[in-house]
Image (cartoon, helix red, strand yellow):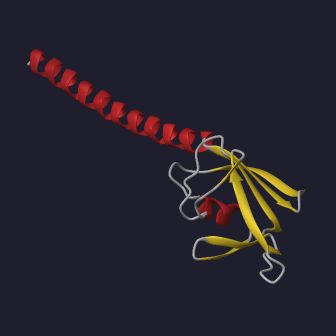
Amino acid sequence: MKKIITLLTVVLGFTFLGGCQAATTATKTAESTSEEVANLKATITLKEADKQLSAKKISFKKGESLLKVMQANFTIKEEDGFITSIEGHAQDTAAKKYWTYTVNGEMSLKGAKELKLKAGDKIVFDLNVTQ
């Protein structure tokens, strides 16, 4: 009888410890996911005719598009994935004044909807006259 009670206690103990381990693993996974999101940062700068309007360091999730990040962090208007107004500064087609942007110092060939941000990206939007 003593052996059965001891065996039952050992089995229940392992079951209890195993249940605690699964919860700890789930908690660690959730923490690492939050840390991963918190670690993905980029800087977005707004300029008009080479005058800086604002700059923000933003956090984002892996695989998020520039358009989605802009919608979450700025007041924008867009058409077909192209940004036409940011924080009340709008394009003027008659004056040929448009928003363009660079990524890490290079002109982007993609619309904001297609561009997926990477950690450390430096995005500069410039509202300027184009030829």
Q: Which of the 4 quarters of the picture holds residue 38?
A: top right
Observer-nearest of 76 and 127: 127
The residue located at (85%, 56%) in the rendering is 54
The residue located at (45%, 38%) in the rendering is 27
Q: Eyeballing the image, is 92 above or below 83?
A: below
Q: Residue furthest bottom?
A: 94
Q: Is residue 26 visible?
A: yes
Q: Residue furthest right?
A: 51
The residue located at (80%, 69%) in the rendering is 87
With 26 as the anchor, is 125 left or right in this view?
A: right
Observer-nearest of 37 and 14: 37
Task: Please state the horizontal and vertical placement of residue 121, each as a whole percent of the image.
Answer: 66, 44
Number of on-image labels:
0
Q: Residue furthest front?
A: 131
With 70 as the anchor, is 81 left or right in this view?
A: left
Q: Is residue 74 visible?
A: no
Task: Please state the horizontal and vertical placement of residue 86, each as a whole percent of the image.
Answer: 76, 69
Quadrant in which the N terminus appears: top left
Q: Which of the 4 quarters of the picture holds residue 51?
A: bottom right
Task: Please state the horizontal and vertical placement of residue 12, each as a whole percent of the image.
Answer: 22, 28
Quadrant in which the C terminus appears: bottom right
The residue located at (10%, 15%) in the rendering is 3
Q: Residue furthest top?
A: 3
Q: Eyeballing the image, is 12 above or below 103?
A: above
Task: Please state the horizontal and vertical placement of residue 90, each as a whole percent of the image.
Answer: 80, 76
